Image (tube, helix red, strand yellow):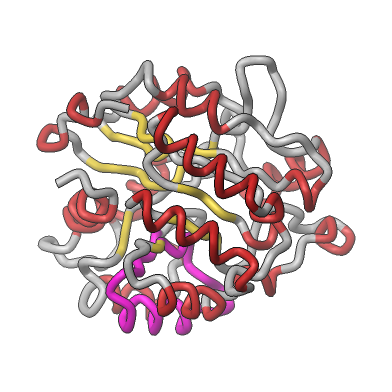
Amino acid sequence: MDLTTLDIPSLDAIDVHVHVEQDSHGCFALDQELMDASAAYFRSGQDRTPTVAAIAEHYRERNTAAVVFTVDASAASGHPALSSEEIADLAAAHPDVLIPFGSVDPHAGKAAVARARRLVTEHGVRGFKFHPSMQAFEPNDQRFYPLYAAIAELGVPALFHTGQTGIGAGLPGGHGIKLRYSAPMLLDDVAADFPELTIVMAHPSVPWQDEAISIATHKANVYIDLSGWSPKYFPPQLVRAANSLLKHKVLFGSDFPVITPDRWRADFEKLEIKDEVRPLILKENAVRMLGLG
């Protein structure tokens, strides 16, 4: 991907958390039961499965760039994953607004490492998305360290879901999805053992928000994205940290399509964030995290 076509100074914002839920063949990232439960949890009435082209147009209209990805949880869920290769190749047609991340199933072992390398070198992927609860793995299990080593060597960030999830919410047994895999403290080990790896902890990490703040404060290579929640529901300690100690470590993310950037930004405008911090959260911190500056 040629990022020179990203006109960073003219962009209003960079949304670092946007899901692709449908491929060009009409296949979906989640099975229907999970899709329906997620829509109910987020009360999302808009199109739940926009195509890559539709996502590009949505963000182009808002003068905003978007980091786009899927989650490969095929081993844990039994549901076929969307192709990160296809997503990256489709995103390459919209280099003015889309920044593709890849996803590999950690349980694939050496194959996951090889695929991660190909996604970067052959498809222009600029980072990787992990969802420990959906993918059913403990991030600090050293079986997965070769994958992190490869991502660090490739020089791209790794974004991890943290905290509770809307996927499976309200279903019996949460559809078998276990929240403990997404405790932020598991990522503290990874951040310590791979100081050259940029890590993004996605979402307000309820019920472990203080852990996430502590890790991001302590580890220079760790950021927090603010996706998945309307800003009006942010825990107060997260708002305080974003305004002070973590003002250079916090990132705008919406979780589109379940939360739109319009809804997120409208509620963000009402949040008590210092004027000098707002542009850091909306764009400047992401520029540094993504290595675009």
Residue 192: give x, y in percent of width and height: 41, 79
Residue 263 image position (x, y, % from top left) = 42, 44
The N terminus lies in quadrant = top left
On the image, the x and y values in percent for residue 268 come to 32, 55
Q: Is residue 199 magenta?
A: no
Residue 102 placement, left or right of 269: right
Task: Name the foreground residue: 17 vs 241.
Answer: 17
Up/down of 109 relative to 242, above or below: above
Image quadrant assignment for residue 180: bottom right
Is residue 159 toward the left or the right of residue 49 in the image?
A: left
Total numbered circles: 0
Using residue 218 as the reference point, say whether residue 9 is left or right of it: left
Which corner quadrant of the image does residue 292 belong to? top left
Foreground of the two, 231 or 168? 168
Q: Is residue 209 magenta?
A: yes
Which residue is found at the position 71% from the left and 55% from the top? 107
Residue that appears at 64% across and 67% down? 143
244 shown above or below 225: below
Which residue corresponds to the image point at 68% horizontal and 15% vertical from the top-left?
Answer: 25
Q: Residue at x 80, y 39 (%)?
A: 79
Where does the image place residue 55, in percent across and percent down from the top left? 45, 26
Asked whether 80 or 266 is in front, the reply is 80
Above-or-below relation of 185 to 270: below
Residues in magenta, as a range:
200-225
